[in-house]
Amino acid sequence: MLRDCRTIGCVSSSPPSPDRAAGGRLRRAGTLALLLAAALAAGGCASTGYYAQAVRGHLSLIAAARPIEAWLADPATPAALRQRLALARELRAFAARELGLPDNRSYTAYADLARPAALWNVFAAPELSLRLKTWCYPLVGCASYRGYFDLAAAQRSAGELQRQGYDVNLAPVPAYSTLGWTDWLGGDPLLNTFIDWPEADLARLIFHELAHQVLYVRDDTVFNESFATAVEREGVRRWIAQRGDARLAEAFAQTERRRADFLALLLAHRARLAAIYAGGAGAEAQRAGKRALFADLQAAYRRLRNDSWGGFAGYDRFFERELNNAHLGAVGAYNDLVPAFEALLAREGHDLPRFYAAVRRLAQLPKAQRETALHEVLAPTVRAKPTLVPGQRPFAAGP
């Protein structure tokens, strides 16, 4: 990866004018569009519309971004936003200095997209299965979701999948990673979709997305997301420790306990649902079991909220919709291998460079072998508590 010029002092310390900066980004964006045109052609006519919206969406995001320094120097920047950008700048420096995450241009600029999500992901699973449908893309391989920058387009896609008989989960996404490939365009910016999150959750998202730039394995969503989630958790623990703020530490610990309870609830019901589908009963019996299980999940959540959490309603939005296979299937993509990665980190003495090197060695193995190797690392340990979808706030409507 090419280093950002600013890291070696070859750019003036004063921020460029917004017009000049935007013009440079748009010229570079034109080059990106030409490069992606080859991918569109490779995808065939049926895929051209999808990739075209992806190119347009990302280029509009790039065009809206300005360096943090420009926002801080602008007297029109609201005080609250100024404070959050300053915090994000500290987190970004900490990520490179203390976590060994890429020291590039990602998260050094900010964009207000004037919408509540960066994009929307569509997850789909068959009516009587938890196996998520996958889509394959040029360059990055296959993934268990389809992303749209336009909500209406995402809704049309979800509707078509439902007509085909799939269970569907349409989830707003606060941020995404371009894996460091667009550093020459300015990298991945901070966005209005997450800049106001609580401090620990903002840290969690930045560390997670930067971890994808350390390592990304084609066609293995669970490996990629679980690795990034393990890095984010370690990073937030270190951030809180160096802050020495007892109130922040206690708030984070309480949030983690609720996250763990929430996910344990989902994973327990996912395991029960998988057993229903694998039990050999007929389709109607499986449908009945499915309906009963999701009703029980709703009731179990209300007991958890009212009894253990003292009425804390931060996860109500997740349960306000009609849940299905696609919701429970998506949970595993971010969590199934997290305990194994955390066990590997502990084995490497919590030395992150050594941990990254060990994960890179695993990434060279065929998928089945690397999963076996990870489970062998985990075998002597007690499974760690699970974690939540990365970057998801307690009230977020994630998968």
Image (spheres, rainbow, N blue to C red):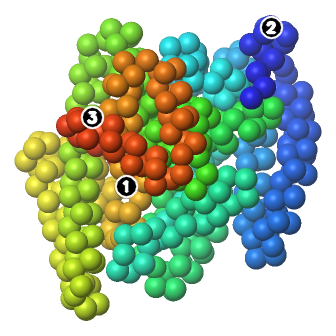
Residue wearing tag 2 = 9
Decide: few, some or many residues near mark 3? Use Cα within 10 Å; few <14, some 14-19, many ≥20. Answer: some
Evaluate whether residue 127 shows in this view. Answer: yes
Circle 1: residue type: Gly
Q: Is residue 94 left or right of residue 235?
A: right
Residue wearing tag 1 = 332
The quarter of the displayed image where residue 276 is located: bottom left
Q: Position of residue 248 (x, y in %)?
A: 31, 19
Q: Position of residue 64 (x, y in %)?
A: 74, 39
Tell which circle, 2 or 3, labels the residue nearer the N-terminal end: 2
Which residue is nearer to you in this view: 193 or 130? 130
Circle 2: residue type: Gly
Q: Is residue 98 above or below residue 125?
A: above
Distance, label 1 to label 3, CA atoms, is: 18 Å
Q: Is residue 53 above or below residue 192?
A: below
Which residue is nearer to you in this view: 15 or 237? 237
Decide: few, some or many residues near mark 1? Use Cα within 10 Å; few <14, some 14-19, many ≥20. Answer: many
Q: Position of residue 194 (x, y in %)?
A: 51, 37
Evaluate whether residue 87 shows in this view. Answer: no
Q: Secondary structure at mark 3?
A: helix
Distance, label 2 to label 3, CA atoms, is: 40 Å
Circle 3: residue type: Glu
Labelled disc at residue 150: none
Tell which circle, 2 or 1, labels the residue nearer the N-terminal end: 2
Which residue is nearer to you in this view: 259 or 142? 142
Q: Position of residue 221 (x, y in %)?
A: 51, 53
Tell which circle, 1 or 3, labels the residue nearer the N-terminal end: 3
Q: Secondary structure at mark 2?
A: loop
Residue wearing tag 3 = 256
